[in-house]
Image (spheres, rainbow, N blue to C red):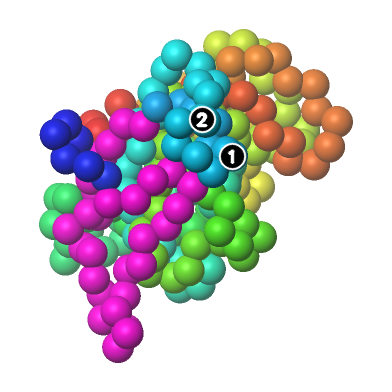
Amino acid sequence: MKYVDPPFDMGESLSGTDADGNIINAQWEGAVFEFPDVDRTPALRGGKSRRSGSVVRCVCVRNTSGGNLVIAKKVIIFDITPIETSTSQQLFGLASGQGGAVNQLGGVGDNDFTGLASVGVATNDLFWLIIGGPCLCSIKSSETPIVGELLTASGTAGALITATFGSDEIGMNSAASSIARATVAETVGANNPATQVHVISGGNCGL
């Protein structure tokens, strides 16, 4: 979103409720921003070095999973169940949890999120979902993607698999639901390793 400062940086989350538990900050649901791909580990703003020459494109989403949600380097899916009552803005402004089935529509959770990383983002809070650009994402431990291969959600929670091609219908579904392309050849040596990918899901969502 040009000419408007994002409400919070990558690596952070934004409170989604007030002291009485009422939903707040709904105006940011579905807002898209681009961030420089930098190392956010240094505390000083000027000390952050670029990881690449690219930008990371993100959409602000609310955690509607009903509990804390671990997001870093995980496939996170959009919550489109309340589509009949939501606005078009909210259609891609809500996230219901980690991906858990093939060809689900979503993106990659903020790689830099460190706030209680093992616990995740609190219910109803807002966070950044990566929909374009370079990042790390978990892959299913049995997968060995090659460079340029399309990757999509899998039955393993939060992990990518290589897109499945067969009939025209299967191929079209895999291509339309692809979340990323592999940018390195992966040799799996551990459960759900994180591999370098380039996320492309924003284009599939029209974001």
Residue receiving disc 1: 41
Q: Is residue 142 left or right of residue 155?
A: right
Quadrant of the image containing the C terminus: top left
| Residue at position x 16%, y 66% in the image | 85
The image position of residue 193, as x and y in percent, is 74, 36
Q: Residue furthest bottom?
A: 20
Query: Which is nearer the eye, 194 or 179?
Result: 194
Picture quadrant where residue 84 is located? bottom left
The answer to whether any part of residue 201 appears in the image is: no
Would you say the residues marked 1 and 2 are in contact, meaning their CB atoms lie under 8 Å apart? Answer: yes
Q: Is residue 174 left or right of residue 94?
A: right
State how far apart marks 1 and 2 are (Cα). 7 Å
Query: Which is nearer the eye, 45 or 64?
Result: 45
The image position of residue 23, as x and y in percent, is 26, 74
Does 76 appear above or below 15?
above
The image position of residue 31, as x and y in percent, is 23, 45
Query: Which is nearer the eye, 168 or 191?
Result: 191
- Going from N to C along the chain, the mark reached first, 1 or 2, is 1
Type of amino acid under label 1? Thr
Which label is found at residue 48? 2
Dominant SS type (magenta)? loop
Q: Residues within 10 Å of mark 2 (few under 14, many from 20)?
A: some
Type of amino acid under label 2? Lys
The answer to whether any part of residue 124 appears in the image is: yes
Q: Range of the magenta residues? A: 7-35
Q: Residues within 10 Å of mark 1 (few under 14, many from 20)?
A: few
Q: Is residue 10 magenta?
A: yes
